[in-house]
Image (cartoon, rainbow, N blue to C red):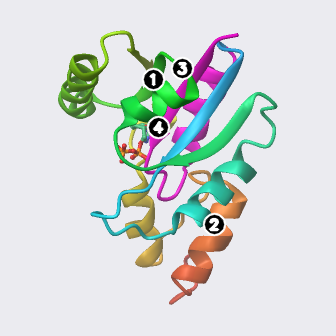
Amino acid sequence: MIRAVYPGSFDPITNGHIYIAERASSLFDELCVAVLHNPQKRATFSVDERQAMAREATSHLPNVRIKSFEGLLVDFMRKEQSRIIIRGLRALSDFEYEFQLALMNRQLAPEIETLFIVTDAQYSYLSSRAIKEVFHFGGSVQGMVPPGVFRRLRERFPPKNSFRE
Ligand code: ADP
């Protein structure tokens, strides 16, 4: 039974994240999407909201579970008895940050491996931050987020104009 963990802020989950979860869940017996609770970073959505959105968005994937964690990822990995960290890669710009993170985690826990899944071209420009910015200023995020996220974005950032779909 091989369990992998896909950690992130998921603030909120986007179709890019879902694509990575779909591909990773097809490779392992179980995929745990782990929502990071970082008290030092102000998130737009609470951990509970981020977990609920992730749960809804991955309900078509029977071997995906949603959890949250605080503190060191390697501690959570050991608790989950998983040795595989999944991360998504968009452009070259992701690489340096991800490389540093992977090496740090290897230093802390040599038995754990970080595996990267390359995004689909259509999601290569998507980030949670960009979604929030576009939405906040009235742009369309059609095809970028699942319906549950769209609904919560609308509650959080009430519509200002008619461009938004
Ligand atoms: P973090 O705050 O840890 O960077 P994110 O929630 O932004 O977490 O992202 C979690 C993981 O998903 C990261 O590895 C990130 O590179 C990846 N990711 C984010 N957006 C996309 C996307 N559009 N396509 C593929 N992977 C993505």
Whether residue 19 is in magenta: the answer is yes
Looking at the rendering, the quadrant in which ligand 1 lies is top left
Q: Nearer the viewer, mark 1 or mark 2?
A: 1
| Residue 66 in view in this figure | yes
**Disc 1 + disc 4, Cβ < 8 Å:** yes
Label 1 and label 4: CA atoms lie apart by: 7 Å
Q: Depth check: 88 or 74 in front? A: 74
The residue at label 4 has a CB less than 8 Å from ligand 1: yes
The residue at label 3 has a CB less than 8 Å from ligand 1: no
- The numbered dot on residue 82 is 3
**Disc 4 + disc 2, Cβ < 8 Å:** no
**Disc 3 + disc 1, Cβ < 8 Å:** no
Q: What residue is shown with label 2?
A: 150
Label 3 and label 4: CA atoms lie apart by: 12 Å
Which of the 4 image quarters holds residue 18? Answer: top right
Could you tell which of marks 4 and 2 lies nearer the N-terminus? Answer: 4
Could you tell which of marks 3 and 2 lies nearer the N-terminus? Answer: 3
Q: Depth check: 22 or 5 in front? A: 5
- Residue at image position (55%, 87%) is 158
Dot 1 amino acid type: Ile
In the image: residue 87, left or right of residue 161? left
Q: What residue is shown with label 4?
A: 7
